[in-house]
Every structure is written in structure tokens, then in C-alpha cells.
Amino acid sequence: MLFLIYSIFPTVIIRVCRLGITKKNKRNNGIALTFDDGPNPEYTTQLLDLLKKYEIKGSFFVVGSKVKNNPDIIKRMHEEGHTIGIHHFDHISSWILSPFQLSKQLRMTEKAIMECTHEKVTFYRPPWGHFNIFTKIASKKYKVIMWSDIFGDWKVETCRNDLLNQLRTTSTENSILLLHDCGETLGADKEAPRYMIEVLEIYLKETIKKGTQFITLKDL
């Protein structure tokens, strides 16, 4: 019961009632592409190449420990105009973090990002979208961003069979789309980002032809 009160109930209440979180872009007609779990030295660089090719800016929620190991990728993200937000220092659920541990995860990740960008960190997305009873207090200095559409792209099979159709049918103007540029987290397939990037290019080609705009979270 204590676990439910500490973790599950706050998550359900915050997400259902949208308390202090953003799940949809209400101020701009563009689509926001967001990417979680990186940076990955192989796939994030490929993704950045793709976004540069189509002159699209994305938003990345990064894992602080991976930032420390791949600072050049974060510097490139920043230099190319992408938005960088917090996704904990370790990819760990808020459900099992104490208030002190949660604050430390946020603080350490912010520090790692700022060492690369020298810019204030504004945005936060908790891993798996999990909150605990203290999240609202610990994250009050950030804008908490969720998503309007999530696709299961952490699995190779989903990327191969379903992702393109999901992107075509669910993404509309004002959407915040969640994809993943690293497959090294619990439950993910390591090579899934490779297939996600291939599908994403097809989707971008089709969508740009329709005149759709892509924005970063800074544009909200």
C-alpha cells in the first residue's frame, strides 16, 4: 500500500489530470520530435545526421551518465540547435527513488548537460513517465514534458512492422512524438534505433512534402 501511495497513485493522478505536465503542443501547429535514452555513440550521431539533412530540430531527453561518456555528441546537439532535457542520470524509475535520490538524479544530469552547453536546462521527462509523490517538488524548476504519441520503437519487430504506419496515422499537428535513440535500456532491443532511424527518414520525406512543420520544445 505504501508503494502504491508513493509511486503508482501519483503517476496515475498526474498523468490523467495532466497536473503540471505537457502532453500536447497547444501553442504551435508544428510536430515536436522528441528522443529519449541517449546519447548513443552510434545511433544518436546517425539521427543527428538525418535531422540535419532535412533541416529539422528535435528535442533530446538525455541520460546524464551517457552525457558524461559522450560530451561531444551533446555539444553537437546544442550547436545544431536541438533542445536538450533531463531524463535522469541513470535510466531508473522515480518509483524506486527516494526524494533525495530523485533530486540528485536531476541535479547531476543538469550539471552534465550544462558542462557541454553552458545553457540553462529547462525541460524534464522522467523515465517511463513514472512519477512519485515528491516529483512535483523535486522538479518544480523544470517544465515536465510527456507525449501525445508513443510507438514502442524500442523493439526491432515494432520498428520493422508497425512504426511507419503508426507515425502516419497518429501524428498530427500539435503532436509531441516520443522515439528512442538508444536501445540499451531495460526491455529494449539494442539495434532498435537503427530501424527507427530508417523508418523516420521515410516518414520525414512524406510529411515534409505535405508542408508539415517540425518544432522543438523551445518553440512551445
Image (cartoon, helix red, strand yellow):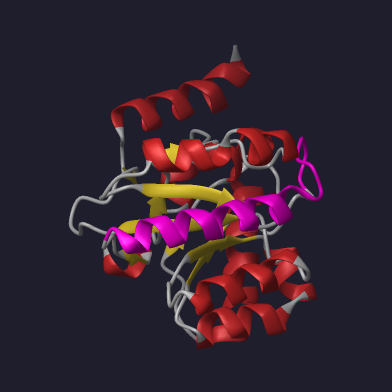
Determine which quarter of the picture holds residue 67. bottom right
Q: Is residue 69 visible?
A: yes
Magenta highlight range = 185-210
Q: What is the magenta segment's predominant secondary structure?
A: helix
Q: How many labels does the image show?
A: 0
210 horizontally vs 100: left or right: left
Query: Residue 32 versus residue 16: which sits nearer the camera?
Result: 32
In the rendered image, residue 24, in percent from the top left (x then y), is placed at 30, 45
Q: Is residue 207 above or below residue 58?
A: above
In the rendered image, residue 178, in percent from the top left (x then y), is placed at 50, 47
In the rendered image, residue 136, in percent from the top left (x then y), is placed at 41, 44
66 horizontally vs 196: left or right: right
In the rendered image, residue 139, in percent from the top left (x then y), is placed at 45, 53
Residue 212 drawn in magenta? no
Work out which quarter of the rendered image holds the N terminus and state it: top right
157 horizontally vs 122: left or right: right
96 horizontally vs 36: left or right: right
Determine which quarter of the picture holds residue 107. bottom right
At 68% from the left and 74% from the top, the residue drawn is: 45
